[in-house]
Image (cartoon, rainbow, N blue to C red):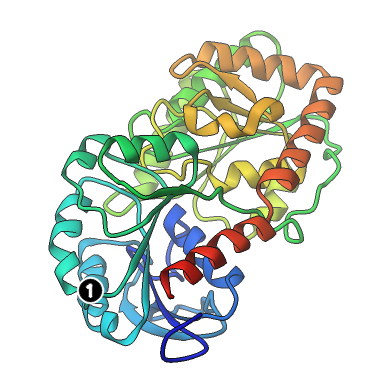
Amino acid sequence: MYPARTCPRVLLLTSGPLEGQEGADIQLAATIAETVPGVEFLWFTRWPSRGRPRRIDHGRAYPVASWDGLPHVRQRMQVATASAVLAHRVELIHAVLTIGAGYPLFSQLWAPLLAARPVLHTVPGVREPAALRRCHPLGPTVALSQATAAQLRRAGFGDVRTVPPPVRLDRWPRRARPEHAVPVVLVTGNHDPAGGTAEALAAGAVAAGAGARFRMVMALRGRAGQDARALNAALRARAAAEGITGVAVLGNIDDMPSLMASVDVLLYIPRRLNGKADIPLTVLEALATGRPVILSDHPQFRSLGDAVLRSPVGDPGHAGRLLYRLLGRPALWDALAERGRSVVELRFGVDRFRAHYAGLYKEMLR
C-alpha cells in the first residue's frame, strides 16, 4: 500500500500554523489529521505557543514564528520555505489551501520545489473566482461542495473530487432549546464587504420592526491586517443606528459548543462567501446542536436541502421576515431542529469523511 514504510509521512500544508486562528483551512486540516488513520503527519505549529495545546498528538510539528496566529505574509513565507525542504522527507503533500488572489503565483512557483512528490489539494473555498484562470493545479483536487467542484473543473482543474466536511457528533450532541425569556440570534460572517454582518443587522432590523424580540450575538474572527477593535465598534454603532440594542460582538470563541447551546437561531447571510468554507463548520455545528439556520441561498449550500431556511442573496428584508416567522412559531423551530440534526448525521459524518480521504491517500501512495 505505502512505499518505503508501513506508516507514510504526509506533509499537511496550510497557510499558517495549525494552532493559530480558526480559519476554514486550519479547521479542516486539523480534522483530516485527527481522522485519517495510519499516517505520520508533518505540520506547522505556532511559536511561541502562548499556552495553546497542539492540535495533533502524533507526527512531527515544525514551528512558525507567529504572535497572533494569523497567516500574515511573513508566516506564509516561512511555511512556503520550510515546505520546500520538508517535501523531500515525505511521500505525499496534502495542501489545504483556500484559493485567493495570491494563489496563482504560489501554484506556479511552488510546483518545481515539490521534489516530484504527489500533491493532493483540498480547497475549503474560493475567495477570488477570477484567480482560477491563472492557477496551476497541484494535483488531484478536493472540493467541499458540488458547486465549487464544477467551478474548478470549468477553470481547468481536471481531476476534482467532492468530499463534504465532517462534524464530530460526539463533540456536538443535540441540545434542547434554551429556556430564556428572550431568544438569542447568533450571527456569523466576517468584516469583509458583503461578508454577512451588515446584512444580518439589516435583517434583524426588519424582524424587530415586525415585532420580534431577541438578542443578537455576533461571532466574528478577524483577518490578517484588520483592526478588529475598530471594526467591532463600528458594528455596534451600526446596530444602534438600525434600532437593535445590546448587540454583543465577540472575537475568537474558546468554547463554541457552549455558545451554540445557548442560542436559538444561527443567521449567516453573506452576499459573498469571501473565502469562507463552502459549507462553514459553524453552520454544520449549529445543525448538529439542533439550532435552526437561516442562510443566503448560495449554490454551495444546496446539499443541506430543506434542513435550513434560505433567503435570496442580497435580500436582508426576506431574511428578516424568515427570522420573525421562525422566532414566533415553535412548531417550525422544532421541525427545523429535527431536520438539521438528521441531515448532519446522514451526509456529514466523520466515518464517510475518513473513508473518502483514506481511499485518496491509498490511491496516491501506491
Residue under pointer 1: 114
Query: Looking at this view, is 89 or 336 the one in front?
Result: 89
Q: Nearer the viewer, residue 1 or 50?
A: 1
Q: Is residue 243 visible?
A: no
Q: Residue at x 37, y 40 (%)?
A: 231
Quarter residue 35 falls in: bottom right
| Quadrant in the picture for residue 43 | bottom left
Residue ID at (14%, 58%): 108
- Crowd tier of the residue under label 1, counting other residues whose Cα lies within 10 Å: few below 14, some 14–19, many 20 or above: some
Where in the figure is residue 220, as x and y percent of width and height? Answer: 48, 45
**Viewer-side residue, 30 vs 116:** 116
Q: Amino acid at mark 1?
A: Leu
Question: In the drawing, does residue 349 fall left or right of residue 62?
Answer: right
Quadrant of the snapshot with the C terminus: bottom left
* 297 versus 113 height, above or below: above
- Count of residue discs: 1
The residue under the point 36% across, 65% down is 14
